[in-house]
Image: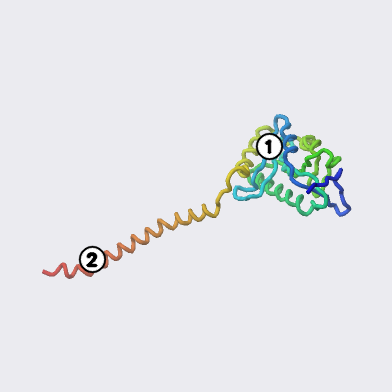
Amino acid sequence: MGVERPARVRLHATNRLDVFLIDQQPVTKDLELLPDGWQMLRDRRQSPTSPATIDHVVVGPTGVHVIAARTLSCGTTLRTAEAASLAEVRGLLRRELAQAGCGAPVRAVIAFATNEAVAEVVVVDDVAFVPHGLLLRQLAAGDIVLAPDDVARIVALLDRLHPSKAHSLTPLTSAASSQSVAERGPSATARTAVAVAVIAVLIAFLLLPHLARP
């Protein structure tokens, strides 16, 4: 079935946007043109145990940008699903950076895969909808808040917290189960040893009078 692509996003009076399907490749190619001082993490898990992924996290002088790459499609409401989901990821990264003592701003961007998808940047509920022809300009807009060392430190942190989608999921339940078994093992062995010792003492106590007789 073909996908009809309108010439531009329709911003409704109810503050909704009509959207789309996933198409990362054009956005990725744009991001590969980022100048020195910027770093990108692509296709990252939201956590080591989560199958949910983040398309791109870009870190540079203007802060941290969490990016979802999309292609327009008719008849789908964005605001309650796509934007809300990306806002949750933005909140997650903000909390992680705050816990690590990093005060970097985190922004949410939905980047369209075609120039004609939107004519200009549209911001709804603090999420920016950007045509990929304007993506790099949008990322660079704003105050310089991160030095190169800050960028490297944040990328290292997020790389650790959000492994590549290509990596296997961490089997949390299995790991916890194995740990639990390992913890129970020594405890059971110790109880068995104590029981054997008690039985040996009782047997010796009962036999001692008989052994003491001439």
- Of all residues, the one furthest to the right in this rendering is 13
Q: Are marks 2 and 1 in contact (CB under 8 Å)?
A: no
Q: Residue at 66%, 44% (x, y): give it.
A: 97
Q: Residue at x 79, y 42 (%)?
A: 112
Residue 103 place in picture, x, y as percent: 69, 42
Front-most of residues 40 and 37: 40
Q: Which residue is mark 1?
A: 40
Q: Secondary structure at mark 2?
A: helix
- SS of the residue under disc 1: strand
Residue placed farthest to the front in the image? 1
Q: Is residue 51 left or right of residue 5?
A: left
Residue 72 is left or right of residue 148, and the answer is: right
Residue at 48%, 56% (x, y): give it. Answer: 180
* x and y percentages locating residue 44 in the rendered image: 65, 43
In this rendering, the count of numbered labels is 2
Q: Nearer the viewer, residue 189 or 29?
A: 29
Q: Is residue 114 above or below residue 35?
A: below
- 200 versus 20 height, above or below: below
Q: For residue 32, which quarter of the picture?
A: top right
Give how far apart the Cα atoms at labels 2 and 1 are: 73 Å
